[in-house]
Image (cartoon, helix red, strand yellow):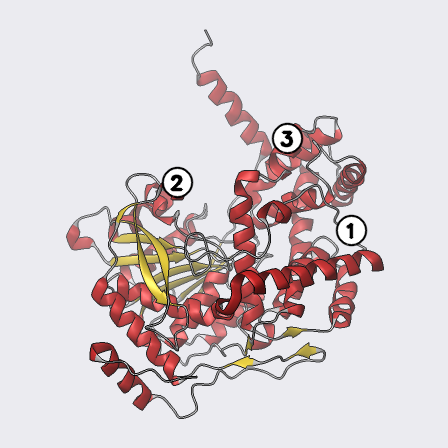
Amino acid sequence: MSVRVWRGVFGSLVLSALVAAPAGGATFPGVPVGEGTGQGSRVRATPLEDAGVLIAAARAGTAGIGFGPCAAVEQLPSYVECGTVDVPVDYAEPLGRQIPLTVSRVRAGGPAAARQGALVYNPGGPGGSAMYFPKASRWPEWKRIAGAYDLVGYAPRGVGRSAPLSCQDPADFTKSPTQAPTEPSASYKQERIARAKAYARGCARHGGADLRHINSLNNARDLEVLRAGLGEDKLTYVGSSYGTYLGALHAVLFPGHVRRMVLDSAVDPAPDKIWYRNNLEQSVAFEGRWADFRAWVARHDATYGLGTTAAGVQHSYELARARLAHEPAGGKVGPEQLRSAFLQAAYFDDYWPRRAAALAKYLKGDPSALIAVAAPDPEEAVEEENGNAVYTAVECNDAPWPTDWKVWDRDNTALARRAPFETWANVWMNLPCAYWSAPRQQPLDVRTAPGVLPPLLILAAERDAATPYAGSLELHRRLGGSVLVTEQDAGSHGIVGGSNACVNGHVDAYLLEGRTPVRRASCAPHPQPDPVSLDQRAVERERALPPAV
């Protein structure tokens, strides 16, 4: 790598950073690579990258973020303002080509004397955008926090209008109907291998030399630059799902710039879990959450008529799968679209009543409700493909993956025998990483001793499937001085600002006053949906309407 001479204030920053950095660059300790895992070429942080963060943050702090009206494409209300902050494509070349990250904000609504700064949110993914987050200022659960903080969202690198990445034509990516065999044949597996290879080639072709720079370490560095651009000495942050891993990386890399962090539904940050083994464990957890949903539907058989036992509900689901394989609903909803719709129910129990009702109506001959919840929306195709492209790039770049299909086939064939609902779909989503051309990183060993960081608040639902509870326990163990709040016997993914008043009380106390439980706390689960009461409320609303004329 060539060394560029930087002058002025940026030059003095890079010089001091180079003097302070250890010879040979910073290394990220990881774990031994397991059997069949291709190591590929590895990316290491260098003194130039460490210095590059200082340069980019100093520049952002000087320039600030010029907020103004949001672009119409963001579809945000007029009370939200938008701007951009520049981050380097490559932190080893901090004065080289820049990516303008789009940022959204609503100012704190309370008295000026009560303002505590900016609160930055990342919803996870990777590949998710938080540009919508300022709208939370109008939600009751966020009212007190929105009075004290500017609510700030942003689109990470590669996402939305932040130098968007695409790997495939969006229309092809969302093409339907498609199959979803739980026991794929050898020929089907070969077809999916070919598709994974083509997708990886598409990412390499469209991403070019920039592709390697879409990774979690750069996302954490970008977060540090955003902090500076907002004029904050220290970061106050809420991250959900993948956003917890991003927040943890930032905390380990920049511990002196952390004020408060809420890490909600945590990814297991152990280097040997990033990301292949995390996905295996996720498939197991989804099977458990799918069982929770079926048990709930069975308890409400009087409403849905899908079976009085979880096994009976499974039979109804399989009957729908078989029918859709033969004749897709509306020509759009096949077995894969059915699975995807019910996967959403495994994320959020708010989805349970509508999904169960759609399945019941379909089996009785009315496909309209199922089409409404399961058919791809052409207007969302670009956003969905973009999100998947960034997800793939980050996960493939972050860590070694098995490069031998036999390893994937062995591990997931065994797993699918006890977790058939999501296992193979998870494989197909991640399989491009087996054929990835960009260099791989060795994951950072996320770990801090007590006293290095202020207390960080970790939130977790015990039966969360997308980020299994064990991951929150591991993150709590690794971040010295962190505090864990558990919603017991519940499984919604992402519980901050949800329907559990106990959880929200802990978040409010932490963000507004800096108060936390001593080390751990538990909250009773939020109530599961009640379709009877939902139906009753619908009747009451209808009665309250004026008569039709």
Front residue of 297 and 224: 224
Q: Is residue 29 left or right of residue 13?
A: right
Callout 2: 10 Å neighbours few (<14), some, many (20+)? few
Q: Amino acid under label 2?
A: Gln
**Which dot, 2 or 1, sits closer to the camera?**
2
Task: Residue at 39%, 50% (x, y): give it.
Answer: 131
Q: Is residue 399 left or right of residue 404?
A: left
Counting residues from the N terminus, which is met first, the one under dot 2 or under dot 3? 2
Residue 518 visible, this angle = no
Q: Quadrant of residue 530?
A: top right
Counting residues from the N terminus, which is met first, the one under dot 2 or under dot 1? 2
Task: Residue at 51%, 57% (x, y): give it.
Answer: 125
Q: Quadrant of the N terminus?
A: bottom left
Q: Amino acid under label 3?
A: Ala
Task: Residue at 24%, 49% (x, y): give it.
Answer: 108
Question: Distance between the Cα atoms at labels 2 and 3?
Answer: 26 Å
Give residue 369's mark.
3
Callout 1: 10 Å neighbours few (<14), some, many (20+)? some
Instruction: Please say if 367 is above or below 375.
Output: above
Identify the residue position indicated by label 1 in the image.
Answer: 181
Identify the residue position indicated by label 2 in the image.
Answer: 75
Instruction: Please say if 393 is above or below 16.
Output: above
Q: Residue furthest top?
A: 549
Could you tell me which secondary element the residue under label 1 belongs to?
loop
**Which dot, 1 or 3, sits closer to the camera?**
1
Which x, y percent locates residue 220?
41, 69
Contact? badges 1 and 3 (CB < 8 Å): no
Contact? badges 2 and 3 (CB < 8 Å): no
Which x, y percent locates residue 73?
40, 42
Q: Residue furthest left?
A: 113
Question: Distance between the Cα atoms at labels 2 and 1?
Answer: 37 Å
